Amino acid sequence: MPERNIRVMLVDDDRELRNTLADILGAVGIEVDTACDAPAAFALLEQGKYDVAIVDMVLPGPSGVDVIRRIKRMSRGTRVVICTAFYSYFNCDLLVQAELIGVDATVRKPVDPLALVALVKELASRAPDAKPQVSDSEAHEEPAKP
């Protein structure tokens, strides 16, 4: 049985990164709509549903947190991935806010394209009520030693 089409909304103000990731995802058959800022993302949400949304936290104007809040209101089944250059939740209030709202995964820039494709496919295959995945920052941390 063939895989169903996966729809992704990719929100990032870095045009080169946005286009590169869209090309990579598109090359493996994933449908991608892109937005450069929150208003463009809001317009995309009005037009359709997405399996996965990949959202940069720092955008011109409203932040990625504002985008995630709108996704959670309008498209509850959409899985949310934070894509960020910030490496510490302690240094970025936006990341803390996003985690409190509820995201399914976090990827760090620079993005590993193969890992992103695998993550998108995995998230899109989950049942709507499945628990969120551990973010990549948590997955790579060493356990605390006694």
Image (tube, rainbow, N blue to C red):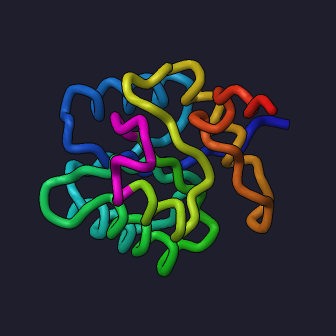
Q: Is residue 10 left or right of residue 145?
A: left
- The percent coordinates of residue 112 (x first, y second) are 49, 20
Q: Residue furthest right?
A: 1
Q: Is residue 51 left or right of residue 127?
A: left
Look at the picture and state if 108 lies above or below 105. above
Residue at 36% across, 64% down: 65
Question: Which span of residues is magenta-colored?
Answer: 84-94
Q: Residue furthest front?
A: 146
Q: Residue furthest bottom?
A: 73
Residue at 52% across, 48% down: 81
Name the quadrant containing residue 32: top left
User: Which quadrant of the figure contains the N terminus?
Assistant: top right
Q: Is residue 76 left or right of residue 130?
A: left
Report if residue 33 is visible in the image.
no
Look at the picture and state if 106 lies above or below 79. above
Residue at 35% across, 59% down: 93
User: Which quadrant of the figure contains the C terminus?
Assistant: top right
Near-viewer residue (82 or 117): 82
Look at the picture and state if 26 lies above or below 38. above
The stretch drawn in magenta includes residue 85: yes
Near-viewer residue (69 or 145): 145
Residue at 20% across, 43% down: 13
The stretch drawn in magenta includes residue 118: no
